[in-house]
Image (cartoon, grey):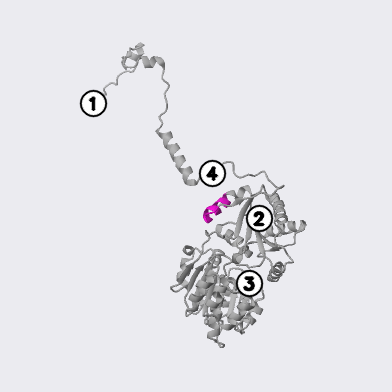
């Protein structure tokens, strides 16, 4: 219960207005530590409520210790624009009965307009590393008064190539601050240098890892012959499942646009979402999806991290994600907050090995499924390829056996009979001396006369 955590009455009022009564596991463990001022390193499964775990203690501090004449007091870094706007909206709802302001700073929006809003000193800034760094370089954002630094989906920011930007931003923040790192697939060995740089004696809450199965999500695969077969399967799956809302993931922008058009042709209410859309289009697309005007969202991985939309009960991977971590984040768009969901991945022949590597990484086995009337010719590899180690050992053994085996010499019957007997010469040539054979002995060279 949130009532077990002593929160400011205005924050409690905002929670009651949203009908939120129960604290999740990550919230119950992280919030008391954060209120004590400790740095945190938190890994918890997607959809577990990590956003409230860092927003609530932050708002609590600002209400208990108001500082109207200071600059920005909290910076929240996230990898994508969609996640930035979602975190900002969560903050606005929680701060509805306070004077605390939050602002989104990310690409796709006018730089000058953002700079004008920053001059009003919002207490909380939520942004992506690239645009935040731009404002720092042009002095339109000052971070010397920062009290809270939050890195949400920290590992993803580094994977996207933001390591240098994140390092520059964190070094610009005030040293007297509280820092928290959150992710659903946190691998500390990959970001250990960042942890050492930004965290001070952190409390580690590793509540789950990528290998922990999400029990509320049914995970299935369907084998497909090729792209055209996948397109027919997607439409058939949607007709069979009849989801309230579905997210279909592709690996490229071009694939998301093409597949969106294919599904529209088959009379599915569909919209595409990808990184090359401007921010106005992206907001409009997500709003239509949330409001139910769009049933199917075909998206690239810009929608894979942190996006929380009620009613998503089906996720389809049109293409196998490139890593186990990305798979976890994709399917995490369903089965959130304890609700049930289904995740289906379409596997072409070229994706079988990648699928198997994801299974090994996540330590699970996907359930194979078929759609009546849409069976393909591909049934999986005819012969499962042995592991590299086993294949290498087999080759070494074959080579050793080859070297150890002496070449066989064909033996004649008459040779076997002659074993142990002295062989008589068969011709004069065999018994002759070298001289007899026509080789003249070397003559002794005569020494030259002296003089």
Q: Which residue, given by chain and number where applicable, does mark 4 sit on?
A: 385
Label 4, label 2: how far apart the Cα atoms are = 25 Å
**Disc 4 to disc 2: CB gap under 8 Å:** no
- Find the distance from the CA under tag 3 to the CA under tag 1: 114 Å
Q: Is residue 327 magenta?
A: no
Q: Is residue 158 left or right of residue 261?
A: left
Q: Which residues are magenta?
A: 353-364
Residue topped by disc 2: 318
Marks 1, 4: nearer the viewer: 4
Q: Dot 3 corresponds to which residue?
A: 86
- The residue lying at 36 percent from left, 11 percent from top is 427
Tell me which corner region of the image, top left, top right, bottom left or bottom right, holds residue 219: bottom right
Q: Earlier in the sequence, mark 2 or mark 3?
A: 3
Q: Which residue is mark 1?
A: 449
Of labels 4 and 2, earlier in sequence is 2
Q: Position of residue 199 (x, y in %)?
A: 46, 73
- Percent x, y for residue 224? 66, 48
- Along the polypeptide, which appears first: circle 1 or circle 4? 4
Q: Is residue 363 magenta?
A: yes
Q: Nearer the viewer, residue 10 or 260?
A: 10
Identify the secondary structure beneath mark 3: helix
| Mark earlier in primary sequence (3, 4) | 3
Q: Quadrant of the N terminus?
A: bottom right
Q: For marks 2 and 3, give the CA distance.
A: 25 Å
Q: Position of residue 373 (x, y in %)?
A: 72, 47
Q: SS for tag 2? A: loop
Q: Quadrant of residue 80?
A: bottom right
At 62% across and 79% down in the image, what residue appears?
A: 14
Task: Answer above or below: position of 153 versus 366.
Answer: below
383 up-or-down from 251: above or below: above
Q: Residue furthest left?
A: 450
Q: Badge 2 local density, few (<14 within 10 Å), some, or many (20+)?
A: many
């Amino acid at each position: 219960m949130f009532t077990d955590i002593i929160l400011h009455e205005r924050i409690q009022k905002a929670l009651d207005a949203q009908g939120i009564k129960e604290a999740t596991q990550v919230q119950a463990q992280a919030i008391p530590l954060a209120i004590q001022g400790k740095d945190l390193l938190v890994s918890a499964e997607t959809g577990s409520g990590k956003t409230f775990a860092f927003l609530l203690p932050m708002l609590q501090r600002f209400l208990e210790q108001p500082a109207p004449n200071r600059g920005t007091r909290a910076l929240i870094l996230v990898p994508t624009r969609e996640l930035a706007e979602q975190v900002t909206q969560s903050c606005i709802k929680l701060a509805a009965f306070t004077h605390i302001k939050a602002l989104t700073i990310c690409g796709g929006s006018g730089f000058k307009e953002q700079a004008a809003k920053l001059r009003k000193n919002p207490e909380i800034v939520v942004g992506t590393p690239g645009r935040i760094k731009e404002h720092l370089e042009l002095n339109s954002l000052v971070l010397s008064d920062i009290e809270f630094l939050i890195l949400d989906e920290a590992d993803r920011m580094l994977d996207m190539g933001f390591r240098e930007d994140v390092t520059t931003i964190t070094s610009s923040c005030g040293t007297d601050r509280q820092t928290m790192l959150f992710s659903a697939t946190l691998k500390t060995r990959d970001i250990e240098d960042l942890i050492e740089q930004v965290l001070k004696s952190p409390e580690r809450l590793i509540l789950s890892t990528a290998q922990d199965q999400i029990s509320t999500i049914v995970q299935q695969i369907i084998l497909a012959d090729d792209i055209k077969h996948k397109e027919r399967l997607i439409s058939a799956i949607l007709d069979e499942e009849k989801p309230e809302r579905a997210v279909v993931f592709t690996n490229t922008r071009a694939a998301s646009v093409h597949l969106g058009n294919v599904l529209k042709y088959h009379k599915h209410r569909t919209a595409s979402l990808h990184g090359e859309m401007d921010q106005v289009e992206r907001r409009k697309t997500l709003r239509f999806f949330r409001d139910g005007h769009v049933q199917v969202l075909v998206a690239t991985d810009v929608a894979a991290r942190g996006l929380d939309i009620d009613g998503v009960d089906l996720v389809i991977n049109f293409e196998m994600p490139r890593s186990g971590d990305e798979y976890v984040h994709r399917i995490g768009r369903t089965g959130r907050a304890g609700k049930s969901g289904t995740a289906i991945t379409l596997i072409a022949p070229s994706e079988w090995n990648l699928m198997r590597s994801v299974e090994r990484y996540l330590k699970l086995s996907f359930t194979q499924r078929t759609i009546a009337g849409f069976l393909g010719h591909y049934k999986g590899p005819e012969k499962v390829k042995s592991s590299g180690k086993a294949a290498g050992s087999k080759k070494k053994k074959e080579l050793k056996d080859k070297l150890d085996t002496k070449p066989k010499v064909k033996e004649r019957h008459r040779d076997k009979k002659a074993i142990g007997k002295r062989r008589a010469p068969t011709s004069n040539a065999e018994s002759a001396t070298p001289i007899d054979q026509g080789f003249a002995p070397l003559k002794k060279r005569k020494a030259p006369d002296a003089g």
